[in-house]
Amino acid sequence: MPDVAIAAPNEAAADAGEQVVRAGGNAVDAALAAALVTMVNEVGIVSLSSGGFVTVQPADGTGAYTVDGWMDMPGRDTDRPLGRGTWDVTTAYGGGVDVTIGPGSVAVHGALAAFGETHAREGRLGWAEIVAPAIAVAREGFRLSSASRYYLDHVHDDVFGWDDASRAAVHDSLGEVTTDPVVVPDLAASLELIAAEGPAAMYDGEVGRLIAADVLDRGGLLGPADLAAYEAVVRPSLVTSIDDWTLATAPPPSVGGVCVAAMLRLLDGHPRGPWSSDDVDRLVRVQRAVLGHRLDVLDGTDDLARDAAAYLALVDRDHLGALESGSTVHVSATDGDGLACSVTVSSGYGSGMIARGTGIWLNNCLGEQELNPRGLHGVTPGTRLLSNMAPTVGRHVDGSVLAIGSPGADRITTAITQVLAGFVSGGLSLGEAVHHPRVHVHRAGRPSEEVKVETEPSMYYGGVGATLTRPDGRLVAAADPRRDGAVRLVRLD
């Protein structure tokens, strides 16, 4: 059994990863178990009604791959007019965010399908053992994390207060966000079905049927045919080589991986050593170029794979000349066998509703306005939606393996890039790179562009979790101080 390094968003998730490792699991088992716990206890951030990507570096050193479990557009089961069952909410969260919520904002979840595919390929323990820690957390209850509380402080009424079950779960008797342990009725029972039946329970099983029936009944689009048709897709990861590292991240339909790859290539191995003012200036120029190109081209394209390949080819050809042209959780795990697993999942800002009989908060990924440039219901059923996610793995020529990723909406790509730049070529240890202050170009290339420079740790700049296993068996894990991250170095001597 291999030793395993784990970086997770909270202590209970890290405990879950350690538990399955001590039961005989590997890095994939640990990462999936930890991620499932976050789907229980990171309320408002992620849930079982999530989409996500899992990037894996196999232990045998073969090419990395990404399992795409991101959201699909629903609507196969209804001919009702589009645009119904939703309303817009303006919140102060994240400096001011407009979101669309309600039953009509619920997309086809895919994270559990991706977990099942990854587990079938790489897992060592049985599926039920992977789900068991999440069942225990759901049954025993949990206190809200700082990230959940921060978000809910802004939206507990507007987003999570319109549905009776949702309101009861997160509020105390005075109508404030609860400080008591949260136990959501029916959630543990849903997880027990998922443990017994596998991920299929969320698609053509009882849990999926309950979700679809409630969404349709309340005026949304997600129906049983949408869930039955959903498939996780395995793709070769998007690869970038820097110095002696081969880094692999999520390919299209994630636009996040494309942005990370482009930024790393444009940074060209910088910074080298302590960051200078020139390094910061280069980071700003790179972010402005890449994020501006994303807004101008990639977010609105009808063929992301084609236009992403063209952009990366331009970056590789013109390099620095290209600079002059126009709510989420993450788990990382690596092990002593050379296996690396990077998992990022999200349920958007949340639709605000718990599907009756399931205890599961449903996503609002059709209502994430920044990720739906064609509008609320602007694509045909079965179409994959856009994503910022960029779970990344790496392999060094000496056999070291790395897993890294971050939550943080449009800051995902800039956070991951800066940590990788500091670690891979900047002379920083993994922990130092994660802790290092960050810069982010907000609304790049727009009249309202703002260069935000971090002066004190803030969850605005992401929440990177990273693990590293050296060929001599040394384990390293780093969790971002900007969030309630937790790490475990599980040695089985």
Image: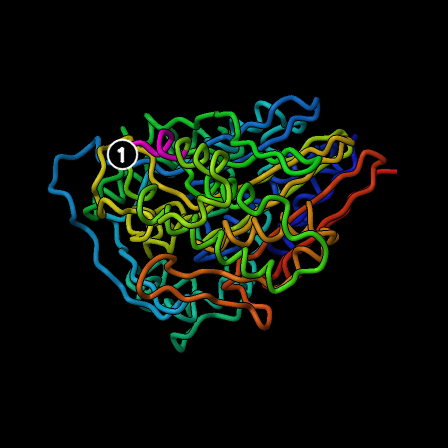
Which of these two is toward me, 284 or 164? Answer: 284
Which of these two is toward me, 40 or 196? Answer: 40
How many discs mark residues in the rendered view?
A: 1
Q: Residue 250 at x, y = what percent? A: 50, 36
Q: Residue at x 43, y 35 (%)?
A: 314
Query: Left or right of 121: which side holds 292?
Result: left
Q: Residue at x 71, y 60 (%)?
A: 274
Provide the residue span drawn in magenta: 302-308
Q: Residue at x 38, y 56 (%)?
A: 349
Q: Amino acid type of disc 1? A: Asp
Residue extending farthest right: 493
Query: Left or right of 313: which side holds 415?
Result: right
Which of these two is toward me, 147 or 306? Answer: 306
Q: Residue 444 at x, y = what percent? A: 39, 57
Mark 1, residue position: 302
Q: Is residue 98 magenta?
A: no
Q: Which secondary structure, mark 1?
A: loop
Prevailing secondary structure class for the magenta stretch in the rendered image? helix
Label 1 CA crowd tier, 10 Å (few <14, some 14–19, many 20+):
few
Res 135 seen here: no
Q: Residue at x 59, y 68 (%)?
A: 457
- Quadrant of image for the N terminus: top right
Q: Residue 42 at x, y = what percent? A: 51, 55
- Quadrant of image for the C terminus: top right
Residue 21, quarter of the rendered image: top right
> With respect to residue 425, does 492 lie above or below?
above
